[in-house]
Amino acid sequence: MKESEKAQDETEEVNEASMEQPAAEGDGAEQSADAGGRPEEASEADRIAALEKENAELKDQLLRRAADFDNYRKRMLREKQETAEYANSNLLADLLESLDNFDRTVEAADKAKDAKSIADGVKMISKNLVKMLEDKYSLVSYGKVGDVFNPDEHQAIGSAEGDVKEPVLKEVYLKGYKLKEKIIRHAKVMVAMPAESGSQ
């Protein structure tokens, strides 16, 4: 009895040993899998870190571009405002000479004995001023007696019948002015109208 029990015990130990050996091999496989998985995890982490870095750089570039554009917009608005505020500085500088001449004429009038010399001085100033405005700024006056009435250019203050075939300017109260082709002031005029045929 004892020998059979001993043989049975030995058989069981062999079976247990054989069962434990594959388990050990399985553990090695798991370790190998774990060891093989770590580089993949590390590589994935590197890619995520690279993407996060690239994303941060793009955000920084976007913020810089937005700041540059905002500065450009503010600069353009400031320059536009300055241009509007000082747009007439050249014209005013050119008018200073005429103002100086008027001041000298006024001073000379206190001592002048001949009114004609004062009038001639004023005419000379006016002529030079008109020439400067025409030559440098393309300012042109219009509206003379006898010109054909044009409602787009002339503002009729009144009208009267006359021996005319079409409406013409009978009197000019204020000359009109054009800056190049743009009217900046309409001429104020009295219009001579053709006599109505029905009045005969």
Image: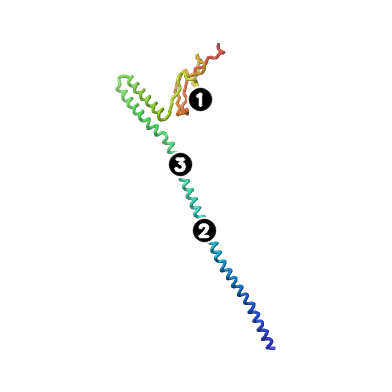
Q: How far across and how far down the image is residue 154, in percent?
A: 49, 23
* Circle on res. 76: 3
Q: Nearer the viewer, mark 1 or mark 2?
A: 2
Q: Residue at x 42, y 30 (%)?
A: 137
Q: Residues within 10 Å of mark 2 (few under 14, many from 20)?
A: few
Task: Check whether the beta carbons of the residues at disc 2 and disc 3 lie within 8 A of each other.
Answer: no
* Circle on res. 50: 2
Residue type for callout 3: Met
Q: Residue at x 32, y 20 (%)?
A: 117
Residue type for callout 2: Ala
Q: Is residue 93 depicted above or below 3 in this figure?
A: above
The residue furthest top is 200
Q: Residue at x 42, y 35 (%)?
A: 87
Q: How far across and how far down the image is residue 129, in percent?
A: 38, 27
Looking at the image, which is closer to me, 44 or 77? 44
Distance from Cα at disc 3 to Cα at disc 1: 37 Å
Rendered-image quadrant of the N terminus: bottom right
Residue type for callout 1: Asp
- Which circle's residue, 3 or 1, is located before the other in the chain? 3
Q: Residues within 10 Å of mark 3 (few under 14, many from 20)?
A: few
Q: Is residue 89 depicted above or below 113 in this figure?
A: below
The residue furthest right is 1
Looking at the image, which is closer to me, 50 or 171? 50
Which residue has dot 1 on it? 152
